[in-house]
Amino acid sequence: MLSLLHTSDWHLGRRLHGMARYAEFEQFLAWQLAVLRAQAIDVLLIAGDIFDTMTPSARAQALYYNFLAQAVQICRHVVIVGGNHDSASFLDAPKALLKAFNTHVIGSISDARVDDLLVLNDSDGVPELIVLAVPYLRDRDIRQVSAGESLADKAQKLVQGIAQHYHEMTELAKAEQARILAEHMRHVPLVGTGHLFAAGGSAGDGVRDLYVGSLAFVGADIFDRALDYVALGHLHLPQTVAGQARIRYSGSPIAMGFGELKHAKSVQIVRFAQAAKLDDWQANHPLDTNADWQPFASERISPTVLLESLHVPVFQRLARVSGDWQTISKAIKDLKKSGDAVWLEVTYRGDEALPDFVGQVDALVADSKLVVLKKINNTETTAMLRAQSPNESLEDLDVHEVFERRLAVSKTTDAQQDMLRALYAEVLTRMQDDDSKAAKPTT
């Protein structure tokens, strides 16, 4: 039996409204190592966004490399593909060294498609798995730019370019699969990867637009039926694509914002074996909804492929408190009684003006383990919030929200604003692409 663990979107180094989260990341990575051991994982696959920024801090880098140093002692192989938050050049820089430890890194696509086709061997040196290691596909890697084309034209070309890339990779994989069957009399499964937005997906907090205009959503049909499993990253909520269990987002392991706190986090284990062997496995390994390192759900996605889901524990409790002052006061007092360390988002929705809202909230949580990361007074008008609110800072806003704040006070027409948004998105995309370009040698 071959066991693969699929995870993604760690976003190491990410902050939540200015609060560092390194303790959470350390606990998650320790838990992940325990799962690798307990579940006898052969292949660990990380589908992009390992880091939150293209210039990760020294501490985030230390977490990454310390984890890899331990993971390679447990798993036969580690496969890492880059995401849109990652620096392709940073990930690729040590790839030759890491490959010596059976850690395969694809930060950006290679000039030769075959270089991104990973044939992973078992402990006897015989091929056991083929991975189509597709990272985040940058615009300029897959699309020819034409003067005067519209956003819709660009989106269409992007989708076509993405589909063509997967088609080429799949044809190479099927040919290699046939070669292995002829040479070793072994049918090896095919696993695809991707860091993209599939149509119909639910994003979660902090999911950055991948392409200009946010129009380039791909359909499930780009993933050939020959692929036994497709491990996706980018969306933070665990989910399937088009109802197909074999095409799946693992989701982020920790809540990236308060909007995700109601969604359970998980990682996926995919087991490949002959049907009878999987039957025996399921019979002898019952599900356990309470154990830290045991699957809570399983699904047979084909006779020879079993998918299991494991809940990721909550390492830092988050909570939203909302309502009038009486409701907020009671909720915070109840949380204080629990004695838990909780990070809060507090939103006042009362009818009466509460000018000292911030001070009153601070007084409520004084001398407790509660930390209020965001305070929102909804009785103030939008204009007052823009001009006067002390609760909104640059750390609260992403790059799109900052631009929208500036656009809101500009003397421009709706048509001009639409054009400016498109141009701004183009600038952001080019900034991301420049990093990938720097990673490729010039001739």
Image (tube, rainbow, N blue to C red):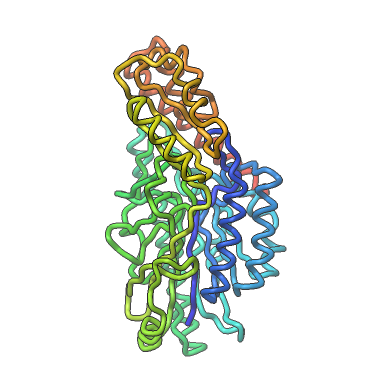
- 377 sits to left or right of 94: left
Q: In the rendered image of this protein, does residue 223 appear above or below residue 182?
A: above
**Foreground: 22 or 440?**
22
Picture quadrant where residue 232 is located: bottom left
Q: In the rendered image of this protein, does residue 35 appear above or below residue 260?
A: below
Q: Is residue 397 visible?
A: no
Picture quadrant where residue 65 is located: bottom right
- 56 sits to left or right of 351: right
- 411 sits to left or right of 101: left
Residue that extends furthest to the left in the rendered view of this protein: 243
Q: Residue at x 48, y 46 (%)?
A: 317
Q: In the rendered image of this protein, does residue 111 appear above or below residue 153?
A: below
Q: Is residue 376 visible?
A: yes
Rendering coords of residue 36 (x, y %) = 56, 70
Q: Residue at x 49, y 75 (%)?
A: 3
**Foreground: 396 or 353?**
353
Rendering coords of residue 179 (x, y %) = 48, 82
Q: Residue at x 49, y 65 (%)?
A: 292
Residue that extends furthest to the front in the rendered view of this protein: 337
Residue that extends furthest to the top in the rendered view of this protein: 411
**Foreground: 95 or 55?**
55
Rendering coords of residue 159 (x, y %) = 37, 48
Rendering coords of residue 224 (x, y %) = 35, 66
Picture quadrant where residue 85 is located: top right
